Amino acid sequence: MSAAVAKGREPNNSNGSAEMRCPTCGSPLSRPAFEAIMARLDSEEKARVEKVQREAQKAAEKQVRALRASQEEIISQRVASARETLAKEATEIINAEKVKAFAETSRLKQQLADMQRRLQPKPAHLIGEPAEISLHKALVAALPPEDKIKRVGRGVKGADFIITVMHGNPGVPTGKIIIDSKAHARWSNKFALKLKSDQREAGASFGILSSTVMPAGCAELHVQDGVIIANPLRVPALVLLLRQQILDSHRLALTTADRDEKVTGC
């Protein structure tokens, strides 16, 4: 017997018999009416329990979905971060391999050029002649027509080219740049020392050594013993920069001289 049924029965006579009473108001009830009420109450209680269970189940499922979504977001972020890291590492590896491949290709090309020179020996002046001609054409194309470019002949002491930078109209010489062209297979420090000596004798502002080979550990552009060593492809642009430096120094000297003349009245 359920607790609700027990609550609905109370003894009311001397022989201990009990009558059915309403569990809510205590009114006497017949057995069928009592059982009907108790069945309804049991049904309502069962429905309430089931409702509570459903709500608890929904809350639990919601928490599980939220937890799964959170975990999926964390996993997604970690995967994206891992992909970014792998992509960056892959790019670095590829770039490093490209640098290595370029260095190896350059080395092999240099070896091939050395072998070709050995197989087809030529006098030094014949080896350097094409390089000088190419450089002369590049200088003529780069410099303004008022500048003077003198190509020194074979057997004449000094650099291969003497450039006189001119200013104004009529042109006034403002400075010199000398250039020596080398197309040797191996570098020698004597190249720079000779050019420095030629620069002093010519009274040039700058000396440029146009060379296909560079000192160990150097590439494209280097300064040694007071002269500039450059790859032949860089020489025309370098000459233009040095030319501008010579002109700026000349203008500054003119301005200073003019100011001093006004101060002294001479």
Image (tube, grey):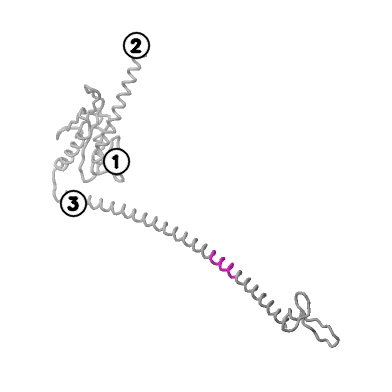
Q: Quadrant of residue 208?
A: top left
Q: Secondary structure at mark 3?
A: helix
Residue topped by disc 3: 115
Residue in front for this viewpoint, 245 or 200: 245
First to last magenta residue range? 57-66
Classified by dominant secondary structure, the portion drawn in magenta counts as helix
Q: Gap between marks 2 and 1, in whole Å?
A: 47 Å
Q: Which mark is residue 265?
A: 2
Q: Gap between marks 2 and 3, in whole Å?
A: 70 Å
The answer to whether residue 7 shows anywhere in this view is: no
Say which residue appears at 68% left-offset and 80% top-offset. 39
Residue topped by disc 1: 221
Q: Earlier in the sequence, mark 2 or mark 1?
A: 1
The answer to whether residue 231 shows anywhere in this view is: yes
Amino acid beneath label 3: Met
Mark 2 residue crowding within 10 angstroms, few (<14) / some (14–19) / many (20+): few
Residue in front for this viewpoint, 52 or 80: 52
Q: Nearer the viewer, mark 2 or mark 3?
A: 2
Q: Nearer the viewer, mark 3 or mark 1?
A: 1
Q: Gap between marks 3 and 1, in whole Å?
A: 26 Å
